[in-house]
Amino acid sequence: MREVSDAIDGLIAYARAKLGLSARNEVYVRNTVLGLIGMESYEGTGREYDGRSVSALLGELVKACESAQLPAAEDPERLTDSVMGALMLSPEAVEQVFAARMAVSSREATEWLYSYSVLSDYVKKEKLDANPRFAADNGLIVTINRAKPEFRDPKKAVSGNSVKGGYPKCTICRENEGYFGRNKRTLRTVSLELGGEPWFWQFSPYGYFHEHGIAVNVKHIPMHVDRGTFVKLMDFVDRFPHYFIGCNAPLPRIGGSVLAHDHFQGGGEVLPLHRAAVAIPLRHPEFPDLSVGVLDWFGTAVRVVGSDAGRVADCCERVRTAWEGFEDRARGIIPADADGVHSAVSPTVVKTEQGYAMNLILRNNITSEQYPDGVFHAHPEFHVIKKESIGLIEAQGLFILPGRLVDQLAVLEECLVSGASLPAELADFAMVFSEMKGMAPSFTKESARDAVKKELASVCERILGNTAVFKTPSETAEIFMKKAGFLHD
């Protein structure tokens, strides 16, 4: 058992150096770890921290437990999560450190919490950094997510985020903090007040962008978007002006697999939508103090800018209510029918020198016989690249593609270079492969990789075009915004 004891000592030394473990608590924490592993003896080695990553130290512990034939090694993920949860600061202590840093600056507070979440192995940064990612010439960001499974069926996506048995009620309830049943021993959250209500913030273990996190309502109530939502989003960026924050439209099939619990998503990266220019400036006689416009964007989005949060919220509410009642059957826009509500907005806000810049993405999840997955969803010819719901993050220009593409696209690259035909097992890629082949008469390894990237970016752009409820900014302004009371500026 000496090998296991040495691995434990390595993690204890790491916790002293990186996680704030005090000398007073060291014996208690070591004994807790021994209990989790199932050991009743211990041989101290006096080991010091040697600078290795937490994943390397945890891997050493798992290997030592396997060699010692300890039952804990049969579930390595639960073992490592439980051990790290014991080594960390308590939720109350984390909250206290966060509050002290908030008194200095909100940026310092969030940077500390994110770093602590990485150091504690809650945020799987090594895995995230291994995900392929590139910025495309069309302004989109394309990533391939190798860390999570693909959910091609939206019903499975929803079930994958539910909890059977009633406790916790869902995967994002605060009761998950420390809950062993979902390997959340390392989860730490911090309290917020948004719109006068209790919320909390946590980082995502498999985030899609820098410091990706979620703000969650303490109450387990369904997702919804109303005037109060806009106020809460602006409250958040008042506290954390270095972050953006937004939420999915509260509709199935177009993102937001956890629709049962009110929450927002945000973080420390400027996404492509935030950089989009206004294509058509507008004005409204009731809101002369605000700047409003339809964006030059692949989807359909409206921006409202102003320094008065109440006025911005009122204007956004005007757009929201108009959109939720708008019908244009010729374009396939049906706001509601016997199957329920189909139109909603997906808001996202950043704070700028001009005030709050609230972007409202117009979404609709209606289906048809031709498009059973959604009229304004990725169309079938693109499902080989992306069939999953196009949610808030993709709608802002950061695409998360399934991990299977890493191997599949590597085969396509080889075919481009060798001139070979498309393998039968990749027949679904016929369209995209044909488009890649049309980019050059012949390919080197480098040019083939460039062709794949260009094709991915093009497909993602066209998918956003599929989600656009109006196909041009002028359509949006003339057909919808005019009906909502807005005029050309």
Image (cartoon, rainbow, N blue to C red):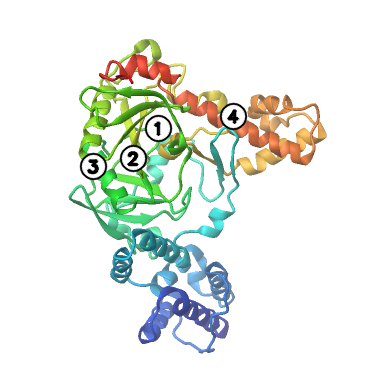
> In the image, 48: left or right of 315?
right
Q: Give the alpha-carbon distance from disc 2 to disc 1, as whole Å.
A: 31 Å
Amino acid type, callout 3:
Val
N-terminal label among 4 and 2 = 2
Quadrant containing the C terminus is top left
Numbered disc in front, either 3 or 2: 2
Residue name at image x 34 percent, y 41 percent: 349
Instruction: Return the residue at label 3.
Output: 231
Instruction: Return the residue at label 2.
Output: 354
Amino acid type, callout 2:
Gln
Numbered disc in front, either 1 or 4: 4
Q: In the rendered image of this protein, does residue 436 appear above or below residue 87?
A: above
Numbered disc in front, either 3 or 1: 3
Q: Give the alpha-carbon distance from disc 4 to disc 3, as whole Å.
A: 36 Å
Dot 3 falls on a residue whose secondary structure is helix
What label sits on residue 458 in the rendered view? 4
Dot 4 falls on a residue whose secondary structure is helix
